[in-house]
Amino acid sequence: MALFCAALSPAVAGNRPPLVLAAASLQESLTAAADAWSAKGHEKPLLSFAASSALARQIEAGAAADIFISADESWMDQLAEKGLIRPATRASFLANRLVLIAPTGSRAKAPIREGFPLARLLGKGRLAMADPDAVPAGKYGKAALMSLGLWKSAESRLARAENVRAALALVERGAAPLGIVYATDARASRKVSVIGVFPDNSHPPITYPVALLKTARSPDAAAFRAFLISRQGRAIFARYGFASAAR
């Protein structure tokens, strides 16, 4: 979808509904928000989900989308530094938590604190997480493991995934006994259970900024962005486990 938008002519782009490039962890919640917007009589926005890092790189390559929602501030910062967003429209509106998951039915329990027995819980398996070198969920996970003194032992045992939903899928399939994902991802799946919650102070705050892109042409883009950060919009995300970010 995001690659498709790069080929749209300005005339076609100006007549279409908003094209939103959004972090993979927003799939259910943003789809529900788009449905609510459509129910108000607007044309339903086009949604494209992937890792924030992948989407930011597509924007840098010229993808002509309208709205970007990142799962961290750094990828939005990078686009801002390159003049690819409209700065006045940037708002951090959602927050999340980081959790440790196992397949449903697992007896593993992990009160997460410094030096907790991650290696023993993994056994001979691997720890599924989004790429810690680029993807926000992986970067948060790495920061948490470093804070808890576990990164050096875990680094060689990672099952690196292209985004947080791919990491979730590895645990759902039993391909990895444990995974690090957002609390909202775990909530979206009946195939995994949360066995531990990472302390908020073990990693940077998990916030989701939204902004209009410089390439925004859809006449509904600004209004849809405003709806997302409104009280009604935030209430939709709250139903899926997101908190509101501090303004």
Image (cartoon, grey):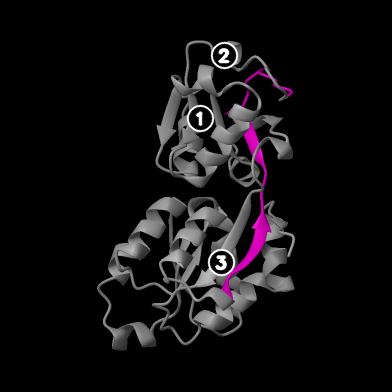
Marker disc for residue 119: 2
Please report whichever mark, 3 or 1, sits nearer to the chain's N-terminal start: 1
Question: Mark 2 is on which residue type?
Answer: Ala
Q: Is residue 103 magenta?
A: yes
> Residue at the spot x=69%, y=33% of the render?
198
Pointer 1 residue: 171
Left or right for 15, reference 38: left
Q: Nearer the viewer, residue 92 or 146?
A: 146
Please name whichever residue, 106 or 160, is drawn nearer the observer in this view of the structure: 160
The foreground one among 177 and 3 is 3
Mark number for residue 92? none
Type of residue at label 3? Val
Q: Are marks 2 and 1 in contact (CB under 8 Å)?
A: no
* Secondary structure beneath label 2: helix
Q: CA separation, marks 2 and 1?
A: 16 Å
Within 10 Å of disc 3 (Cα), the crowding (few <14, some 14-19, many 20+) is many
The residue drawn where x is 58% and y is 70% is 90
Residue 151 sits in quarter: top right
Numbered disc in front, either 3 or 1: 3
Q: Earlier in the sequence, mark 3 or mark 2?
A: 2
The image shows residue 222 at horizontal and vertical percentages of 54, 81
Residue range highlighted in magenta: 89-111
> Which residue has dot 3 on it?
210
**Does label 2 or label 1 sit earlier along the sequence?**
2
**Where does the image place residue 188, in percent across and percent down from the top left?**
60, 46
Q: How many marks?
A: 3
Amino acid type at image mark 1: Val
Quarter of the image where the C terminus is located? bottom right
Whether residue 145 is situated above or below residue 215 in the rendered picture? above
Q: Residues within 10 Å of mark 2 (few under 14, many from 20)?
A: some
How far apart are labels 3 and 2 at the CA level? 37 Å
